[in-house]
Image: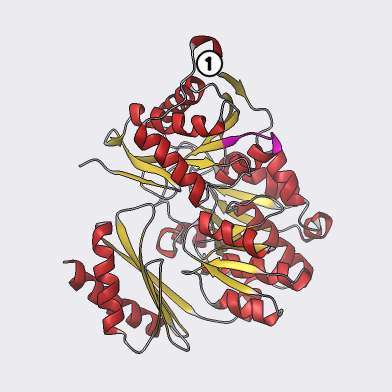
Amino acid sequence: MSERILSISGLRGVVGNGLTPEYLTRFAAAVGTLANQGTVVVSRDGRGSGEMVRHAVVAGLIATGCRVIDAGIATTPTCGVLVTHLKAAGGIQITASHNPIPWNGLKPFSAEGSVYNQSQGEQLLDVLNNETFNYVPWDQLGTLEICDDVAGPHIKRVLNLVDVPEIQQRKFKVVLDCNHGSGGVATPRLLEALGCEVVVLGGTADGQFAHTPEPLKENLTSLCDEVIKHKADAGFAQDPDADRLAIVDENGRFIGEELTLALGADYVLARTPGPIVVNGSTSRVTADIAAKYHCPFFRSYVGEAHVCAKMKQESAIIGGEGNGGVIEPHVGYVRDSYVSMAYVLAGLAASGQRLSEWADSLPQYSIVKDKITCPREQVEAACDALEAHFDSASASKGDGLRLDWDDRWVQVRASNTEPIIRVISEAPQETEAQELCAEAMKIVSEAVS
């Protein structure tokens, strides 16, 4: 059975086992068909399979008459920025994000520089599945160009968000863990522009991950140690395509992905009150922060496309997901680790606090995440079993199942990127969250076994 996951958000699969050159070319041709012979930006993370995937993608786009702008190795948010900067018809980021090395994938962007929305994603799947590609004759084939100063427009937009001289005066020392992903190409340049002394771990973007690529606590022990060793003010960890950010404080303490969005929201809403949108799996600390500044708070379904759509609907000034993904409309409707770093450093510079002090000043919750391998068709049975077991909770359906009590919640839903069910719980104390998650995992396991 081939390992390939296809959704409105894009494509992921194991190279050579479902993710073949032929299928990649067809997917790119579907994107090219929707681009209607316009300009399409192509970039990739540092995975070793990226060059093969790139050639297949370029072939599909040129075959549909597109002008291809090759940005080489770049972060996912950089791809989104380039689409709008170059007024392109769309883009494709070649990445499998935090999936293991054998995986790769394609993430399409609309002309708005954001991931495809529901309608656009369904159009792409229709073209792909029905093979209604707009292949052009030999004299209308597209062209290929190399992009100059790939990261420049992205960095400029991020620097425009904050008081750069104020940050520069603090002369922060930062340990940056790129883990051999695309963040190594230009993230040090951003941090140096902010006056930081940067110690880079895994700065070569070759996809040879030094540790499991998802930026979780258990994968970042080396970063925690390096922050202490270098007496740094902060440690930043990116995932392979650098749209997510996890944070370590000056004491070498992992403060996690959930607080990335919380810190960004605390900084932004204090200065520019307005609506905020997060997904249904995000810590309620962001809701508390919104209430603190009397700002409207909204939840969307899980998935970057759903968050962006809700942000546009509610005219949100900031949004994101609790996996370390901050979305700042002034830069682009895409999760962006550069924005996260800039806002954290700006908050530290403005307050004079240490990172640990700022993190500890926020409402405190403990969130626990687990997962179980499961076919998507069994998710409904797992949700039904969980709802029946926790009959005292308030149930919200539509994106899997979320169960809420006064001071805690648990959610179960199918992943959009892996053949798994995710189980997430949150409570005031870690032991309470762990017990809730474990109980939910037991019910789910029995339901799908």
Magenta includes 130?
no
Judge from the rendering whether residue 183 lies leftward or rightward of residue 124; answer left or right: right
How packed mark 1 is, by other alpha carbons closer than 10 Å (few <14, some 14-19, many 20 or more), is: some
Furthest residue in direction right, as rendered: 165
The residue identified by callout 1 is 141
Q: Find the magenta span and give its range.
A: 85-90
**In the current view of this chain or complex, which residue is farthest to the left?**
449
Q: Is residue 88 magenta?
A: yes
Q: Residue 436: horizontal and vertical position, in percent?
A: 34, 81
Can you give x and y, in whole percent of width and height, for residue 13 in the image? Answer: 34, 41
- Residue 400 or 164: which is nearer the viewer? 400
Residue at the spot 69% in from the left edge and 51% down from the top edge: 197
Q: How many marks?
A: 1
The structure residue drawn at horizontal position 54% and vertical position 81%, both measured from the top left corner, is 364
User: To which quarter of the image does residue 207 belong?
Assistant: top left
Q: Relative to residue 229, is residue 329 drawn left or right?
A: right
Q: At 62% from the left edge and 52% from the top edge, which residue is drawn?
A: 333
Residue 433 in the image: state x and y as whole percent: 39, 80
Q: Is 370 rendered above or below residue 153?
A: below
Towards the viewer: 166 or 28? 28
Question: Can residue 138 be seen at all in this image of the molecule?
Answer: yes
Vertical placement of 313 versus 124: above or below? Answer: below
Q: Nearer the viewer, residue 427 or 47?
A: 427
Please name the predominant secondary structure of the magenta segment in the image: loop
